[in-house]
Amino acid sequence: MGGLSAALGAMRGEARWIGWPGTVVPQALEKRVGTRLSKDNLFPVFLSQDEEEDFYGRVCNDTLWPLFHYFQGRLRITPEAWARYVEVNERYADVIVGHCEPDARVWVHDFHLMLVPAMLRRRAPGLSIGFFLHIPFPSSEVYRLLPGREQLLRGVLGADYVSFQVGDYARHFRSSCLRILGIDSDPDWLDLDGRRVGIGVDPIGIDVAGFREVIDDPQTERLLADLEQQYEGRKLVLGVERLDYTKGIPQKLHAFERFLEQDPERARTTTMIQVVVPSRLESPEYRAQRDEIELLIARINGRFARPGVTPVEYMHRDISKPALVALYRRADVMMVTALRDGMNLVSQEFVLCQSESGLPSRWRGALLLSELAGSAQVLPGALLVNPWNVDGVVEQLVTALELSARQRQRRLETMAKRVEALDSRRWAEGFLTRLGRYSRRDRRTRRPPTVDAALEARIRRRFARARARTILLDYDGTLREFEVHPDLAQPTPEIRALLRDLASIPATEVHIVSGRRRRNLEQWLGRLPVHLCAEHGYLAREPGGEWRTLVELDLGWLRPIERLLRRVAADVPGAHVERKSCSVAWHYRQAEPEYGSWRARELLNDLHQHLAGASAEILQGHQVIEVRAQGVDKGLYVRSLFPNGREASHFVLGIGDDRTDHDLLDALPPGSVAGHVGGLLPSTRSGGGRREDIHIVGPGEVRAFLGDLVASMAEPAPAPA
């Protein structure tokens, strides 16, 4: 996190840093350590030895790290350790809330703390929360292997703004939200529980000013002169990595060995310096990785070394900043063969050190970069390689060593501009600017996640003292959660009991106003003492009565549109068509999510052309496109119930969750209560103060709210209105 510290260095005076101190602190010393760190605005989250092993070792390093880097074979999942991951994230959230104001700006970093944003949102809804993932986000096919996949996604989506290193990672994240949570998104945002969450790309850069200071350091100049003398007349290929299986060090060594095999005389003219910074040597896997690297180097040197010539020089130690910069400045080729990397700042460091003034043109080097590193998408002058293709890497290495001075100079100049633009301080400022934009936008549109206590108490009182009551409820997405197939969304015993309890209240009518066919509603709810309205207001029946149509329609367009929808459904596995009396719907909830969404957009264009001049309209619901006759909507049914408006003592409540329910809520008589579920916001036709708008998270909260209304009738009755 050294680069992160530099990136946020400009805010050190005003920022508070919250994190693990990096070691297990004895409990007796925690208070003293905390006091000392607080003087520098550092606030520790202490972990015991067991917590460190479970949270950091077993989950972060053994589960999330290999999975996010596509090393499924190294994935180890420990349920007990996952529980510890949740506990530690909770502790972080508690410490954060304890050290910030209710409207503060909080920036959460990386895969260790993916649950923290949602935890903060629950504790302090007024916070402005950003989340940045420094490592790759894998494709949804890989990510879905994780048992806690949904929990992590919802944790991250507690933020106002979520950002990634490159566009591929953001695209994978959106795809996972669609496939796992069923939440579709635009390229730069998605709606969740009535909140808009921004999704962005903010590639991180290096501390440009800090590296320039080291470049100008006299010690760096001395070390560079020593390197030039030591390797005079030789080409220098440089590798600098932390010890980790994601860095592709063995693949690089295999490629260099093949390079020497093709022409053993190259060992006399070319030297590889491989710097490996020690990491996690307490792990048997990492020690095995070190041993493999050292055996490969020994084999290469055993095969190709000559008196006074060592083809691969190996440094397994930490290296000072001046020594590192001197190596960057002297190298002819920087070789980065990561098998997967979130960004890889080594490549940016090399470019900056090579492009700064003071180097003879003959020293200008070339960058050989893995196409699987994030930097490959931000450094357009690099020679890209697939690290698994040994012959391809060798071919590009030869090309890099043979580039003319002019070609090397041109490539470096192109990349240097990008490195300058990605400077870590600019990165931090850009992220925080976008966080501010999304958090302000969200606050303008954000609604309380559930009916707040004062408002609910007022509605309960109105409900209890009313002389008559009418409750109008949408079904799917409002009273009942969505299912993968509409026929699976049968009412639970809880729902049936709730409707029966509501309808049994004296002078109370319950109306289910749905887009479903009358057959579904009659089979599921026909024996309950409730009114049923099917197909968005076309058909209705009283409890135990006969179905009746509410309007006469021209349905000449219906059969051709049904044929079109069935042709498309035949091409989309999992899609199906539902024919109703005055409408037809194309469902794609069971289709492959991205393909289904793409075909849905294509279908919408076709429908607009086929329906030109027809008395029909197109409705978009939750993974369904429906074409229905014009003049039919849920508002038609509501207006038939209140032709003369609402009497003052009549309590009216309507609740819905999607665009089709705007018609229902907009038709409510003045003084009614309109419930908006999930992301449904009041229509622009709502008429201002004509009604009272409430916002509810989802079907579970709707049922709880209705249950509270039933319970209010058991309370001491107030005087009638």
Image (cartoon, rainbow, N blue to C red):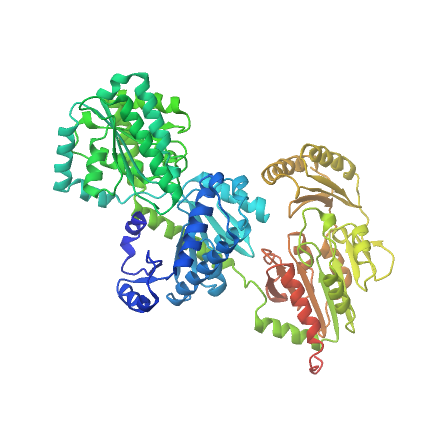
**Residue 477 location, x and y as percent?**
66, 55
Query: Which image quadrant for residue 244?
Result: top left
**Relative height, residue 620 to residue 233 (above, below):** below
Q: Compare residues 543 and 491 and report the one nearer the observer.
A: 491
Q: Position of residue 273 (x, y in %)?
A: 25, 31
Q: Position of residue 533 (x, y in %)?
A: 78, 56
Q: Is residue 426 left or right of residue 605?
A: left
Is the residue 40 above or below the residue 333 in the image? below
Q: Is residue 538 above or below residue 530?
A: above
Q: Residue 66's spot in the image, x, y percent? A: 45, 42
On the rendered structure, is 376 left or right of 525? Answer: left
Name the foreground residue: 686 vs 561.
561
Q: In this view, does 75 lie to the left or right of 627?
A: left
Q: Which residue is drawn at 34% across and 39% down?
A: 344
Q: Residue at 29% x, 56% y: name it.
A: 11
Observer-nearest of 706 and 27 = 27
For the C terminus, which image quadrant?
bottom right
